[in-house]
Image (tube, rainbow, N blue to C red):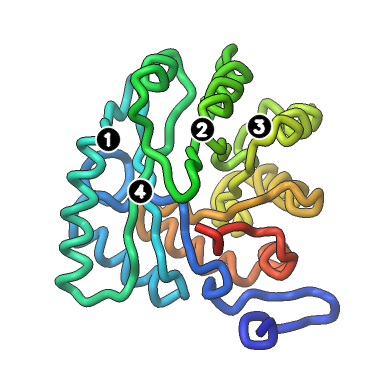
Amino acid sequence: MFRALFSKSGSNHQARDFSAVKTDMHSHLIPGIDDGARTIEDSLNLVRKMHAMGFRKLITTPHIQSEFYKNTPEIILSGLEKLRNAVAAENIPVQVEAAAEYLLDDGFEEKMNAGNLLTFSDKYIMVELSYYNPHPNLKSFIFNLQCEGFKVILAHPERYTYWFKDFSKYEDLKERGVFFQLNTVSLAGFYPDPVKKFAEKLIDKGMIDFIGSDMHNLNYMNALERSLKEKALGRLMASGRLRNGEL
């Protein structure tokens, strides 16, 4: 199987496409509700391209934040229905589902207590941190979610530069049972070079459980295509550690 999915150069694997991953579990494809796709035409263009790259299931995850993107489950699920109908009308053979990317901010506890959190698969919930500093209640948020049976996925840990010089922060989260989701585009240099290097470090340390496109627009798509040339992605996809196929 790996012969069909990877080409070899010495001991390194290079991914041909994402058919081995099957499911993308981080994207912003519902139009007009966050900083992702703007129109349904934009959404369909991205979905077509992702299907052509080997994805058969897309779990789109709009932002839910207290300040900038005040989405609700109702807004997201309504948008999902419209996106599904458009995908079906275009005969694109890809399954589309929706959850959310929750920012752990001052309003998250209220959302958590309301008991209406969007999850996917076996009660996975995706959370993200501020790019300036983590919320002081980070650990209690994680603990309380896990006590309720949620499986916490931290989105793009390679982007939290304030932890780069203290790797124990990542080790502590892994010991607490937090799953890590890498933005595939990080490996293509989409963000500053230190982010790419740290992404590769997390891969080499065996700490990545999921990869996601974080798809927003064609700039992300171009970076996703470039990522297939990165040996680090090939190593990760060939490692057997990724859990995307379970979703």
Tag on residue 28? 4
How far is the residue under mark 1 from the one under mark 2?
17 Å
**Which amino acid does the dot numbered 3 rest on?**
Thr
Viewed as shown, does residue 9 lie left or right of 6? right
Quickly name the residue at label 1. Answer: 73
- Please state, as top left, top right, bottom left or bottom right, where the N terminus lies in the image: bottom right
In this view of the protein, which residue sits in the foreground, 197 or 105? 105
**Which amino acid does the dot numbered 2 rest on?**
Glu
How far is the residue under mark 3 from the one under mark 1?
30 Å
Label 4 or label 1, whichever comes before in sequence order: 4
Q: Residue lying furthest right in this view?
A: 11
Question: Residue 31: x percent and y percent?
Answer: 23, 49
Badge 4 density bin: few <14, some 14–19, many ≥20, Cα 10 Å: many
Task: Please state which of the two labelled residues, at mark 4 or mark 1, is closer to the viewer.
Answer: 1
Label 2 or label 4, whichever comes before in sequence order: 4
Quickly name the residue at label 3. Answer: 161
In this rendering, is residue 152 above or below 234?
above
The residue located at (67%, 67%) in the rendering is 237
Question: Residue 121: x percent and y percent?
Answer: 46, 50
